[in-house]
Image (tube, coloured by chain):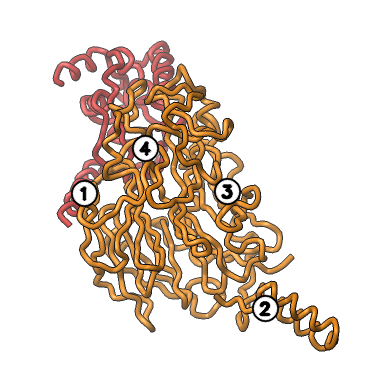
Amino acid sequence: MNSFLPVSGVTLMQKFAWRWLLPVVLPGFLFLSCQTTEPAGQELPAALADNGGISLPSGFGAVLVTDTLDKGARHIAIRDNGDIFVKLKQTANGKGIAVLRDSDGDGAADQKEMFANFTGTGMRIHNGYLYASSDTTIFRYKLNENTLLPDTIGELIASGFPVQRSHASKTLAFDGVGNMYVNIGAPSNICQTEDRVAGSVGVDPCPQRDRQAGIWKFSDSQPNQTQTEHGVNYARGIRNAVALSWNTSTNSLYALQHGRDQLNTLWPEKFTDADNEILPAEEFLQISEGDDFGWPYCYFDQNQNKKVMGPEYGGDGKEVGRCEGVKPPIVAFPGHMAPNDLLFYTGNQFPESYKNGAFIAFHGSWNRAPLPQAGYFVVFVPMTDGKPSGDWQVFAQGFPQIPEVKNPSEAAFRPVGLAQGPDGSLYISDSVKGRIWRIMYYGV
Amino acid sequence: MNKFLSIFLISLFFLAACGGNTGQQSAEPETKPEVAEETPTVSATQLAAGETVFKTYCMACHMADGMGVPGMNPPLSKTEYVNGDKDRLIGIVLNGLTEPLTINGETYSGIMAPHSFLSDDDIANVLTFVRSNFGNSSGPVTAAEVAARRAKQ
């Protein structure tokens, strides 16, 4: 939004300068280039020497916004004025959402308020409102001009979702033209006759796909909607899309699926521990209305680069069968790493190569036991026109504070939520202690 | 809102059920439960057999160190669910668990599958293994106790 210096403008200016006004224009040009990496009129706070315990690519640094939300955080959302809303993993003094403000610009929050009596994961800011979901209900709160707290009487936007224990996060995305997209996860691992019982076959057709395992579309402003009366089944066959985001550069919905668990322990005669370590892929999906990504019948094998039938539906790890033509992911990550948030970078602070690319927070695996766990980092996928334009790379790592995680409970920190500040800083939240990092680019 | 309330009340119930030992566990990890005094001997054969069953059926979710997965699969270490009432513990293995439970302030929402397909011996051995490891020392479970609990189904 603040980008007033497109590349083509630079080219024109350079041509102009070459002929006539080189001594005048070149210094001005250099000055303006600086403006694209550091927002005008705002000094970035100095990075901590240890970046708050994580490592980052060269040129980047981090400060700690907070280290005192000891209930653990889930998703975060940031206002235009820089106030940070944090969904807590568990309520603190009966409150489930914290609002933080850094009033002196040193990077650390110095004001805090709490409100709302529920927890959950989903939270986004849209059209002057904070949208926040419990596992069963979506509320919105009108933001106030001057106060930290929004109007704390929430407006009920949507409810009537199936009550479920597994994959209950109602994560949210908005398309900017009146629609809200909601993840409704599958209530099981893989729709077996008996959930998570070795050798139990899949129910076919899987009835869980009727009201779950997909994305539902609602109005972003109509109060008191219910899934059955107002929700539109926008996409099907997605096991659980905790990371769900609208890409404003291509006007399309994207998500990452938490892939199925336990290929090895449920089907030991077909899959080894080493197979299960990386299979199935965690899928990065581009979602158009009406898409079906095949859960529970199909999973994506990144080694074979195709969707194959799951063992619950007669698959042997190779047979494609009914999965022929099922829409593949745009990026296939190794298994079980638990992608929990997705952010398309639209800021001007980071180098140009980050523009419109995707940051993904991987909460970290548990289902790789007895082999070491993986994830526990934030990756970056460079993208052009909504498609990957290069290999994914680890952006922020070291969250667990130990070299190898055998059990998730050993990890000191686990990244779970992402948000972009008004100056283009990237914020990362942690589910273990509620630590929040602000990542900034200082130049190499 | 009624659903909220019921989930909240259920959580409260479980919190209360295991509330008695929460402080003690974190404050004094060295302290052994009092039942240790009268613990019958646990045979090495039973422990070895139990470890095999554990690795096959339990470890994927409860982890090699029995610490479980935060938010999902509960720990088997120093909890009343493991070291307390054997009948309840055997029942969980036979029937699985679908209600959320709270241990030491952390709520676990994972679903445990029923394991009634395991033999009485297998269940007795694995529970003996669990009750003798991960910081637990609350004594064996016998096949007869499993059979008696199974008969009540």
Image colour assigned to chain B: red
For the residue marked with disc 2, what is the amino acid?
A: Gln
Earlier in the chain: of badge 4 and badge 1, it is 1
Disc number for residue B7: 1
Mark 3 or 1: in front is 1
Earlier in the chain: of badge 3 and badge 2, it is 2
Q: Chain of mark 4?
A: B
Q: State the residue at coordinates (28%, 64%).
A: A139
Secondary structure at numbered mark 2: helix
Q: Which residue is mark 2?
A: A35
Figure check: A104 above or below A280: below
Secondary structure at numbered mark 1: helix
Q: Quadrant of the N terminus of chain A?
A: bottom right
Disc number for residue A401: 3
State the residue in front, B62 or A209: A209
Disc 3 + disc 2, Cβ < 8 Å: no
For the residue marked with disc 4, what is the amino acid?
A: Asn
Direction front: furthest residue: A325
Q: State the residue at coordinates (73%, 76%).
A: A10
Q: CA distance from mark 2 to mark 4?
A: 49 Å
Q: State the residue at coordinates (43%, 66%).
A: A77
x, y percent for residue B21: 29, 42
Q: CA distance from mark 3 to mark 1?
A: 35 Å
Disc number for residue A14: none
Mark 1 or 2: in front is 2
Q: Which residue is mark 4?
A: B73
